[in-house]
Amino acid sequence: MTTPIRPIGHRAETFEEEHESFRESFRRFVEHEIVPNHLAWDRDGIVPRGLYERAGENGFLAFAVPEEQGGAGIEDFRFNAVIGEELQYAGITAAGNGVTLHNDICLPYLLRYSSAEQRARWLPGVVAGTLIPAIAMTEPGAGSDLGAIRTRAVRADGGWLLNGTKTFITSGINADLVIVVARTEPATARRGMSLLVVERDMPGFDRGRNLEKIGQHAQDTAELFFDGVLVPDANLLGEEGAAFDYLMANLPQERLSIAVSAVAGAEAALQWTCDHVRERHAFGASLGALQSIRMSLAWASTEVEVTRSFVDQCLRKHVAGKLAPERAAMAKCWATEVQGRVLDVGVQLHGGYGYMTEYPIARAWADGRITRIYGGANEVMLDLIGRSLPLVSTSSHRH
């Protein structure tokens, strides 16, 4: 069992008393429901559906949903951040990733773009954890480039005929509601796409195997196949042809969510490593007495503190509705790169133990590698950031 740790710095600027009370409640839930079971779930390659139901019963799912649909009506992303952080501090990222996907990534689409009928049909189950959502963007030939999506939906009597393949879909096995990004018009690369909600057991909807990954073993990740799936008009989410705009509006929160988890993961790795080098002895002294090790950890600590400051600043801006997309890209890119460096230092300084999966640093190292790829690969983040800079002159004259 891993002992949850706390961040190094003071964070009163970001969190209030109600958030810390929520943190204590969620930490107890993690310690009781997830920590004793997560290694077994890693071996199984999936989290049982009952975890979502217990999270729903305790108020940890979809709390932004209005009270009339069973939620708490609390649209404050700091509560989401608390969940992402506590999962990292407990060293159980993979077992809890479905919860952050549920709250941070899928819910905004269902909440912002659904009709009154759709909200009444879906949101109570999403709050209760009896309906598990997923979002299907990535395809075998389309990853960070959403304009390359080829899954198509054509008009049919009463709805749409959906054909295509999606891959690397988080919660792909457990999902009851899959928000599918599909091309509904033969338009330009980034236009003419719509969001269609495919429900469990619709004819023509099949799931591939639970994919075997380097890390994140407890998080089910699957290929999804759509072969002539008739998606009724009632399952069109938002306006036809508006999916690209919806994705662009929601990706900054997804990237901030990744950044929040990444810096917390780096803090946890730093704490585990400091504990290890203090307790482990070599050449008659603790490892921490060696100057080279102190220097490595001093640099890691500095990077973590600087990253924490920036990510918390982005979190506050997002809560105020002022987080620019390029800032979210910066946070995602930088925080995941720092996480990777700190995890690598942690594995190295744990010695042989750092390569053993019974140690949280080893599991976190394997689990954390994907963060530089999903949510938009970091190379794409850098391009997005670069395009926001004033690098091209608006003047036609040369000076």
Image (cartoon, rainbow, N blue to C red):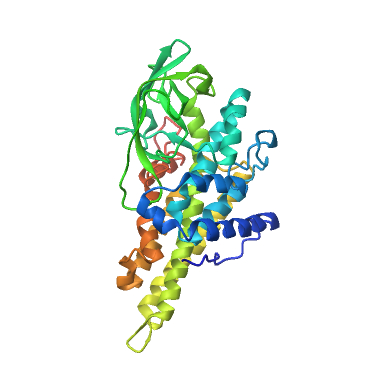
Residue 309 vertical position relative to residue 272 in the rendered view, above or below: above
Which residue corresponds to the image point at 41% horizontal and 33% vertical from the top-left?
136
Is 281 or 42 nearer to us in this picture?
Answer: 42
> Residue 19: percent from the left, percent from the top?
65, 55
Residue 236 vertical position relative to residue 366 in the rendered view, above or below: above
> Residue 318: percent from the left, percent from the top?
59, 45
Looking at the rendering, in which quadrant would you find the C terminus? top left
> Residue 353: percent from the left, percent from the top?
33, 71
> Residue 376: percent from the left, percent from the top?
40, 41
Residue 28 vertical position relative to residue 132 in the rendered view, above or below: below
Q: Quadrant of residue 144?
A: top left
Q: Is residue 243 visible?
A: yes
Which residue corresponds to the image point at 30% horizontal and 34% vertical from the top-left?
140
Residue 137 vertical position relative to residue 193 in the rendered view, above or below: below
Which residue corresponds to the image point at 53% horizontal and 34% vertical from the top-left?
249
Badge count: 0
Q: Is residue 256 visible?
A: no
Considering every residue shown, the one lying at the far top of the view is: 157
Q: Quadrant of residue 345?
A: bottom left
